[in-house]
Structure formats: structure tokens, C-alpha cells
Amino acid sequence: MHEAMGQAGFPAEEWRRDDGYAISTDPARIDRSEVARFLAGEAYWTPGLPPELLERALAHSLPAGIHAPADGMVGFGRVVTDYTAFAYLRDVFVLPAHRGRGLATWLATVIRSHPALATVGTWMLATRDAHGVYARAGFRPVPNPEFYMSLRRGEGGDRS
């Protein structure tokens, strides 16, 4: 039997819950049109995201789809990582009909058990309104926030 391969040549992983939901890191199971629709049209963090940029992002991330028994892919998230020391969880969403079931928390929890991420010691994410979701998955405010810096295109220091 052919084993599905995930990103960076690591085998795809799958987790299942008793209620029938599953999370898969098999890129072939990602409903790219649904991800594109949600991220470009509904997500506050990626308004108007062009499909070609989504494809580039997916090619350089570990994607995870949340699948319902009868509804196909109903949620998504991806990990931007070096597969060694650092991982950034982003673009997590659950479609409205499936919210309130702990699916985003479950994704944020189980993705950390992917064997390809076993040595990652630093996990980060950013959220405007879902702090409780990620706190239930073990995420906490960054210690020593004064150590962290960021730069967004168009802000000071950007010379492009």
C-alpha cells in the first residue's frame, strides 16, 4: 500500500476522534479551493489573498485539514517550520457549521505530535480573537515580549 507523503518528504499523519472527525497532513486531502475561499474572503488576517500566493505558502508549510465524516474538509491550519527548532501555527480556521466542537484546539494540540516536528522547541502563533482556543491547547503569552521584534511591509525600516 502506498503511504501518503506530507511536506518535506515526511509521511503524512492522521489523527481521529470518536465523533468521526479526522485531521490529516496529507497535502492531497487539502481542499485548496475552500482554503483559498476562506482565507481570501473571510479571514481578517489574509484579505484578498491571491491563489498563487496561497499555493506558495502551502508548498512551504506543513498543512493540516480537519475532515468531517459527511462534509469533507471543514477546517484547516498550517505550520511554517524549519522542522528542527521553530514552528509557527497560522491560518487556522473552522467552518461555521462545525465551530464550537473544539476542533481548532484539537488541531493546535495534535499537530505538535507530528513526528517531523518532534525536535521543535519553540512554537508560536498570533491571534486577534481566539486566545482561549489556543490556551486550551497549551499556548501562553510569550515570555519576555520585549525580546521579540517584528516588521511588516510598509512599516518603518522597510526599504523595498
Image (tube, grey):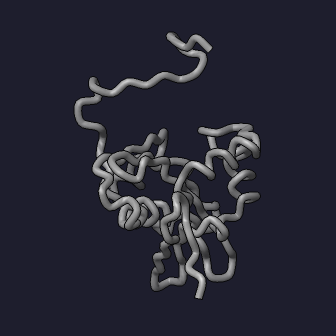
Percent from the top left, x then y, of residue 100?
51, 65
The residue most toward the left is 144
Q: Residue at x 65, y 70 (%)?
A: 29
Q: Of 117 and 152, which appears nearest the observer? A: 117
Please report the residue visible at 53 percent of the width from the left and 76 percent of the height from the top. 22
Give the image location of residue 159, x and y in percent: 58, 11
Q: Is residue 143 left or right of residue 90?
A: left
Question: Left or right: 105 with respect to 141?
Answer: right
Q: Is residue 74 above or below residue 59?
A: below
Identify which residue, 133 or 61, lies in the foreground. 61
Nearest the eye: 10 or 137: 10
Q: Quadrant of the N terminus?
A: bottom right
Q: Is residue 40 above or below residue 29?
A: above
- At x 42% / y 44%, what residue is drawn? 125
Quadrant the C terminus occupies: top right
What residue sits 48% from the left and 61% below the top?
104
Across and down, in percent, residue 44 comes to 62, 39
Residue 102: x percent and y percent?
Answer: 46, 66
Q: Is 144 left, or right, of 100 in this rendering?
A: left
- Counting labels gives 0
